[in-house]
């Protein structure tokens, strides 16, 4: 057996490395804790995942006694690169990717300070933290669609008079909505976590673990379908008065899922042979009897240098950030376009979060055609104050409905095109583009990644420009109007991002 001091020494090194990593990347750590503690985030299971991660680390610690502690230059390099990637995601305000980097940084921290074998021993315990990350929320939309389609097929087959239209389930005596909260994403993540833990405790093969994950995922999805169908059936039978229909559907779902999950675990573990373990020797082996080298701190120091790269660059980029830009202003009309004139009211009311500059103006053309232009500018972006945010809406809140989306090219410019309709059915065409320090994008994610990369040397001015023309008499006529406007005015509009301009009409800080 191994001397207790040797095991404790190796455990202390690994625990110290993980603790240093969590503190060094405190913005990610604190954001993750906030996600777990927010009752409306859907991440409350994260606290249980963290407890299980701690237990798994303790469970794996005896195996570290056989692992030599040696610094890994490759691990240090990968750790430094992951720190830079984390910083780009942080500056870009893409929180899911930022937090997704945390388990990788923890793993690479152990790899850098103690070597690949130590990182491999602790790999599952560190990777298990992935089940507590908010990135799983990206599966909510496809699972919601899958649930709605399943209800549309299964409900009539079992005798329920349900007619589906999108996410709405129409009954003769009421209507249900398969909302995003009905996607069952929490059941899905918890089921996968239990399956992964079960495979680790069994020390199962890759095939066994993959099969457990597959079965648990299917069980979670089907369990959610049963929940939704049962609630619809109760609503139909009780004329929408049952307590499970009005307020208790989530609790009912968890009770149903836990019952099915416990039954599944019992079935898949029946007859599973106990994991064969090597007998513990009664005498100290020759390798264990050899004198142990004292704990070396330089691997921790070297890993600390690699760990500090991302947070260090963050500090430098903040302290060296250039002064705030001049307000984003609407340019004066040129060629055959007259304006800008303020736009009051109307169905197009964009909404953006955080302090920014926003204007909404109109230009009139020689042929009597009008183009509305919206400009949204941020002198610096941060979490909760960025161009791409769940709380932002270029089209506003419910006043305009998207009918079609495409991409159009005009001269050297590319725009995202949306054909929209207001509440009276009147159609219009909206062209939009992101401008990050003079470079333009139509894909929101790419614009944010570019912003994060550029922010390493100081935050560039970020803007979103959108142009709208009414489909009068047709949407093709609206596109032609927008094309003429872009050809005449785009250079003037885009120039306000990279140069200072005198204050003009319509600009206001929000």
Image (spheres, rainbow, N blue to C red):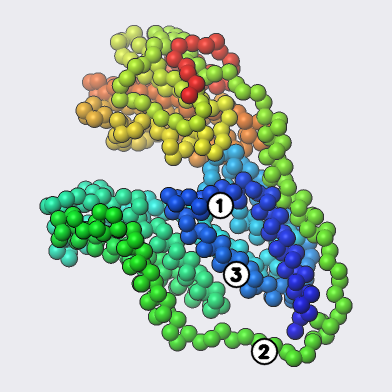
Residue highlighted by disc 3? 55
**Among numbered discs 1 and 3, the one appearing first in the sequence:** 1
How far is disc 1 from disc 3 in space, using C-alphas? 18 Å
**Among numbered discs 2 and 3, the one appearing first in the sequence:** 3
Count residues near mark 2 (Cα–Cα under 10 Å), then give few for <14, some for 14-19, many for 20+: few
Say whether marks 2 and 1 touch (CB < 8 Å).
no
Q: Residue furthest bottom?
A: 282
Compare residues 10 and 120 and report the one nearer the observer.
10
The quadrant in which residue 267 appears is bottom left
Query: Secondary structure beneath disc 1?
Result: helix
The quadrant in which residue 219 appears is bottom left
Q: Residue furthest left?
A: 172
Q: Residue at x 43, y 49 (%)?
A: 40
Closer to viewer: mark 2 or mark 3 = 3
Residue highlighted by disc 2? 279
Count residues near mark 3 (Cα–Cα under 10 Å), then give few for <14, some for 14-19, many for 20+: few
Say whether marks 2 and 3 touch (CB < 8 Å).
no
Compare residues 333 and 387 and report the one nearer the observer.
387
Compare residues 215 and 288 and report the one nearer the observer.
288
Determine whether, in the image, residue 464 is placed left or right of residue 471. Answer: right
């Amino acid at each position: 057996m191994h001397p207790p001091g040797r095991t404790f020494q190796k455990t202390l090194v690994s625990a110290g490395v993980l603790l240093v990593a969590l503190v060094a990347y405190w913005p990610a750590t604190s954001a993750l804790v906030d996600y777990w503690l927010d009752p409306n985030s859907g991440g409350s299971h994260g606290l249980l995942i963290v407890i299980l991660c701690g237990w798994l680390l303790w469970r794996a610690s005896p195996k570290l006694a056989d692992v030599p502690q040696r610094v890994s230059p490759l691990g240090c390099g990968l750790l430094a690169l992951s720190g830079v990637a984390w910083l780009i995601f942080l500056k870009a305000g893409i929180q899911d990717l930022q937090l997704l980097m945390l388990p990788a940084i923890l793993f690479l921290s152990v790899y850098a300070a103690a070597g690949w074998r130590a990182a491999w021993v602790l790999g599952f315990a560190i990777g298990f933290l992935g089940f507590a990350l908010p990135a799983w929320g990206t599966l909510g939309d496809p699972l919601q669609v899958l649930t709605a389609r399943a209800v549309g097929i299964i409900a009539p087959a079992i005798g329920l008079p349900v007619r589906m239209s999108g996410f709405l389930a129409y009954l003769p005596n009421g209507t249900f909505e398969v909302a995003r909260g009905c996607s069952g994403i929490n059941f899905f993540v918890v089921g996968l976590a239990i399956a992964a833990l079960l495979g680790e405790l069994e020390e199962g093969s890759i095939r066994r673990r993959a099969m457990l994950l597959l079965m648990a995922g299917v069980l979670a999805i089907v369990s959610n379908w049963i929940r939704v169908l049962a609630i619809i059936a109760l609503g139909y039978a009780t004329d929408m008065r049952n307590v499970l229909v009005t307020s208790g559907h989530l609790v009912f779902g968890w009770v149903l899922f836990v019952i099915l999950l416990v039954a599944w675990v019992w079935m898949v573990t029946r007859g599973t042979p106990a994991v064969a373990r090597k007998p513990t020797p009664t005498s100290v082996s020759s390798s264990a009897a050899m004198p142990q080298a004292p704990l070396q701190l330089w691997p921790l120091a070297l890993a600390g240098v690699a760990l500090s790269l991302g947070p260090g660059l963050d500090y430098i980029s903040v302290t060296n950030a250039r002064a705030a830009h001049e307000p984003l202003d609407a340019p004066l009309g040129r060629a055959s376009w007259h304006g800008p004139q303020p736009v009051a009211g109307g169905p197009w009311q964009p909404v953006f979060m955080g302090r920014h500059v926003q204007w909404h103006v109109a230009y009139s053309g020689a042929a009597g055609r009008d183009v509305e232009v919206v400009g949204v500018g941020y002198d610096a972006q941060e979490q909760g104050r960025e161009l791409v945010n769940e709380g932002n809406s270029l089209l506003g809140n419910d006043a305009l409905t998207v009918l079609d989306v495409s991409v159009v090219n005009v001269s050297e410019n590319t725009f995202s095109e949306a054909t929209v309709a207001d509440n009276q059915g009147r159609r219009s065409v909206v062209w939009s583009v992101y401008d990050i320090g003079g470079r333009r994008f139509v894909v929101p994610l790419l614009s944010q990644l570019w912003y994060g990369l550029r922010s390493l040397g100081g935050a560039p001015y970020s803007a979103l420009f959108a142009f709208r023309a009414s489909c009068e008499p047709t949407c093709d006529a609206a596109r032609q109007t927008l094309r003429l406007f872009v050809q005449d005015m785009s250079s003037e509009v885009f120039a306000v991002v990279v140069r200072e301009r005198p204050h003009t009409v319509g600009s206001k800080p929000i």
